[in-house]
Amino acid sequence: MNHIQVALGEGLTVEGALGIAFADWRRGGYIAHKLSMSSDGFSRAELMLLVASSTEVVRNKALQSEKPAEKIREIVFIYEKLFCLIRLVETTTGSFLLLVLDSEKGNLSHARLKLSQISSKLKLPNDSEPACYQDQ
């Protein structure tokens, strides 16, 4: 779980980051998460709600995609005050990263690049599935 925590910590270095989660869309829940120390009122409950709703979107889209060219790589939700960036982790089957940014402070282009770099490096030991969901 340590490598996941390192990846989440890297994600929080993105300007305007409020929180980040590593989740499993097959099981429908998060594995680990971190909130920024300066999350400006953004709570763990809000992050978990975004993870839950994002899980449904990713699951539905992933199950609809039968052709390799149609595989989703990332999804962006733009709310009035938040950017939610979902990046599927291709090195670990069925998982994704969700980065939540303050829309006034965050740079969506930089966040997309950073999350892409993080997801390409993230791999579970022996390509195993996560043993359990952790509250971090």
Image (cartoon, rainbow, N blue to C red):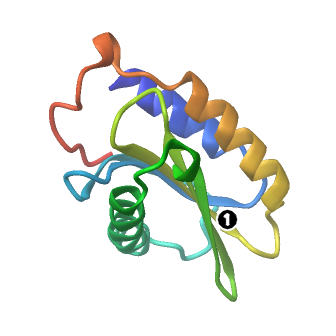
Q: Which percent across, then down, holds residue 18?
A: 60, 62
Q: Quadrant of residue 118?
A: top right
Q: Which percent across, then down, holds residue 39?
A: 60, 65
Per the image, the residue denoted by label 1 is 101
Q: Who's the residue at 43% across and 30% down the image? A: 4
Q: Amino acid at mark 1?
A: Leu
Q: Who's the residue at 39% across and 56% down the image? A: 62
49 and 95: which is toward the camera = 95
Q: Who's the residue at 62% across and 42% down the image? A: 11
24 and 1: which is toward the camera = 24
Q: Is residue 112 above or below residue 131?
A: below
Q: Name the secondary structure under disc 1.
A: strand
Q: Quadrant of residue 99?
A: bottom right
111 left or right of 85 in image: right
| Residue lying at the far top of the rendered structure | 126
Q: Which percent across, then down, holds residue 84?
A: 60, 67
Q: Is residue 14 above or below residue 101?
A: above
Q: Residues within 10 Å of mark 1 (few under 14, many from 20)?
A: many
Quarter the C terminus occupies: top left
Q: Who's the residue at 65% across and 76% down the image? A: 82
How many marks the image carries: the answer is 1
Q: Quadrant of residue 103?
A: bottom right
Q: Which percent across, then down, holds residue 67?
A: 47, 48
| Residue lying at the far bottom of the rendered structure | 80
| Residue lying at the far left of the rendered structure | 131
Quarter the N terminus occupies: top left
76 left or right of 94 in image: right
